[in-house]
Amino acid sequence: MTPLTTTTTTNPMNSDEFRRQGHMLIDFIADYHSNIEQYPVLSRVKPGYLRQLLPPSAPYEAEPIEEIMKDIQTHIIPGITHWQHPSYFAYFPCSSSTAGILGELLAAGFGVVGFNWEASPAATELETIVMDWFGEMLSLPKPYLFSGGGGGVIMGTTCEAFIVMLVAARDQKLAEIGKDKIGKLVVYCSDQTHCALQKAAKVVGIRPGNVRAVATTRAAAFALSPDSLESAVLADVEMGWVPLFLCATIGTTSTTAVDPLKPLCHVAKEYGMWVHVDAAYGGSACICPEFRHVIDGVEGADSFSLNAHKWFFTTLDCCCLWVKNPDALKRSLSTNPEYLRNQASDSGGVIDYKDWQLTLSRRFRSLKLWMVLRSYGVANLRSFLRGHVAMAKAFEKLVAGDDRFEVVVPRRFAMVCFRMTRTTPSSEGSDDDDDGDEGANNLMNKKLLERVNGSGRVFMTHALVGGIYLLRFAVGSTLTEAEHVMEAWKVIQEHADAIQGDYKHLY
Amino acid sequence: MTPLTTTTTTNPMNSDEFRRQGHMLIDFIADYHSNIEQYPVLSRVKPGYLRQLLPPSAPYEAEPIEEIMKDIQTHIIPGITHWQHPSYFAYFPCSSSTAGILGELLAAGFGVVGFNWEASPAATELETIVMDWFGEMLSLPKPYLFSGGGGGVIMGTTCEAFIVMLVAARDQKLAEIGKDKIGKLVVYCSDQTHCALQKAAKVVGIRPGNVRAVATTRAAAFALSPDSLESAVLADVEMGWVPLFLCATIGTTSTTAVDPLKPLCHVAKEYGMWVHVDAAYGGSACICPEFRHVIDGVEGADSFSLNAHKWFFTTLDCCCLWVKNPDALKRSLSTNPEYLRNQASDSGGVIDYKDWQLTLSRRFRSLKLWMVLRSYGVANLRSFLRGHVAMAKAFEKLVAGDDRFEVVVPRRFAMVCFRMTRTTPSSEGSDDDDDGDEGANNLMNKKLLERVNGSGRVFMTHALVGGIYLLRFAVGSTLTEAEHVMEAWKVIQEHADAIQGDYKHLY
């Protein structure tokens, strides 16, 4: 149990030293979480701050952990935007938990690389089991589960899932129409679909001009209209383009809009498209029966993904992807070099996840998902999510009760889209606001957001939809309790008062 | 500090509970590392073992951590192939360390998502600093460092680096020759290049038939010959193909061959290709001056990557990629949706790493690399690597001293490629072995490997190069000491004796 010194010859995995430092780190993290409310949510450092604080080169001699942790406290923490802060309401949450963090720790402790079954059978098998468990909790149709001929895989992020799905769909389609026809392929989505889809399409060689972001409207709560999709597809087909892929979203980034799966799948299937359902944010809610309807129609799609690190307590990274036809993935992504050959793989009786994903190496991510499911159980997990939804509802009510504000789109999950209006709040569903007024409203809300975030007491982000600059209040940080929502509203109101002062001449 | 019960309403990030469970987990991992030698290196479970042991569905009520950890001990550990076992000599190591594991823990504890600067300035800035530190330790030419106009980024794996580099190169080339010319592009590598390159090329839309795996020879120790490359390129250019990309490898998977960078870059540059140096395994050694020569010529390439999780104590996943021209990446991979806009990004004065990689979300991986560099320092890190090399040298000597065996290719780093020979060992550099003899030799070595791995006392893997089935003895697991190498050699010899008995009639 001697501390590392500058002349250590201790093995870097020495158990005593690991134990000593590990306990220190656990306490450090526990203290960080206990004290997190003392920090401004949004970091206040200026660009380049850290290079001035750290030496220009790596140390030649070892440094003791105590020194490193001191620097973490004084140099790193001020540069952190505290995603786990209870007053963090920005982007989407990256909801953590004890089980999630410790699952990650355990995976790092085992240090296995489960690219194929043999490289650690438990890593592969636990993943198949947990993905079936989770799929069942979401009431995914049987064909998405291993027990129904499909199956699930854990990736890092939805961006990877997009690339993998596009590659599988692309290769399947090119096998039909000719491998030199890649320039003909068209991908469909809405103007609310996450930008990662456009990027993924570009990565796999689809021309950026061949991604159709079908326009949505406020009247339809920014959901993709099956009729608009069909018109777009028809126009393309007439021009000789080849429909390849539709991405439908359950809980869009800007407003948590829900695309209607059933009629969209109907259109897509008529034109031979692969349908992927991106439920990165909204998917988790489907473990609650009252939310399950948002993915009605998923039986007509080909693949479905959600980010358990967003709103399922599993820490970054944990994108859960289910597919009905794993063979389509394997046809595109399999490799079989001699140096990876082994009896189990040759037998064909095992899953080698390397052939389901972009990368060869993979972390033992199923451990943390398994630990989350077991540590909390379905009952608690539902109640955690319902708690977030209830807090968002309460916030929505506060907004609706203050006539300087309006709720811009109906709340669907645990995020409220709202804004200050200096004009009469525009009626819901109307798309024909006056541009000049909107311009002033938008600027005012931008200023409000800057002030609120600058206070350090709350962090929210914005979106711009249908010409409206709106503030997104996303509840879901694990430590958030009702009091933090109330406090955030107070901060927002205070700054609204100040802003109103600035704009008084207009009222 | 009450344990989780089935009716918990405790917040899943409750600090007391985190502390309690965290200390348990740290002790569990420390004990696992202490006792790791009691487990067979290669797991002995049969396919499907785990589904029989776990319930068919996730629990409805919470389960206590004690229950979960009991299952980890009895159900998960038997299904683990122990990559951190000191007698693990398979594939390449995934070398762990206290600093690496705890860096991962700390990143999970902070739970930040550093896709852009604002989302946690420390995550971005520490990464730029650490990548400059590490680049300097490797004596990478200045243009690869931020301080020299280039820069580094940490990804998950080399597979991602391949995809990113290919996309950047592809888009740059298509901008020159026309965006409909993707079918003309050709990628070059050797028949020893990692299979991930072929997969990456396929992912980005390069036709599988347009990847030229130039043949290597045993005489040239399986390195890519600049002359062979030039012949291949010339033949392609004459046929109207467009050379796009060359991947050179420093430490190939099968035999740790080193491609000669200087003359290869010379050829590639003549034909306008992007050169990527894949030093996934061999790169780390370049922190030792006596190994730095293996990347001489890297100044002529465009990008360079190594896996710090392979042989640099940083735990999966940590692929370090340096590029001379980050703008080429950013041109291909940037996204700028309104919901991610912020003042810092708009100012252009900060790095938003989302535009340097495939995915949007990213873990705080630089923490673990920083902790490894500081906890051990350059001096210890060099001595750890040299220790591995010394053990490999010792093993090589043992092999060379037993006339039933031969070293198949000269050792370069910490891996020995060897085999049993029942015929007179073929002279080094000869490619014209008799096929019948080689077939029998190969079968014998395959049997030897099965027996050795089946013993549970050692885990090695194989490769097939130039028709020769060879055994790879890769030293690099952090816990490996000289005694484990001696013990492994004893196990190999014992099984060689037994095999020799089986083959006695042939001797």
Image: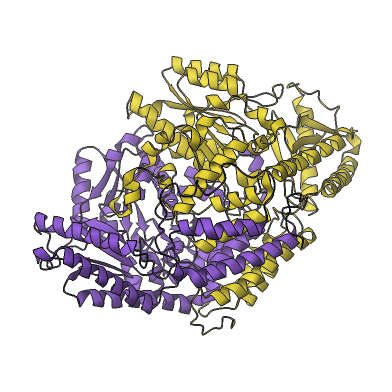
Chain colours: A purple, B yellow
Q: Is residue B433 above or below residue B38?
A: above
Q: Specify whether B82 is left or right of B316.
A: right
User: Could you tell me which residue is drawn at 30 percent across and 37 percent down?
Assistant: A184
Residue shown at the point (59%, 16%) measured from the top left = B227
Q: In the image, B258: left or right of A2?
A: left
Please state which of residues A454 and B491 is positioned toward the viewer in this rendering: A454
In this rendering, the count of numbered labels is 0
- Locate residue B88, reporting x and y percent: 74, 50
> Which quarter of the image is occupied by the C terminus of chain A?
bottom left
Q: Position of residue B33 (x, y in %)?
A: 73, 60
Comparing B137 with A13, the one in front is B137
Quarter of the picture containing the N terminus of chain A is bottom right
Left or right position of A216 against B416: left
Residue B213 percent location from the top left of the image: 56, 28
* Vertical arrangement, residue B41 with respect to residue A410, above or below: above
Based on the displayed image, in which of its 4 quarters is residue B333 positioned? top left
Asked if residue B31 lies left or right of residue B346, the reply is right
Q: State the residue at coordinates (18%, 55%).
A: A467
Residue B92, image quadrant = top right
Residue located 56% across and 80% down the image = B4
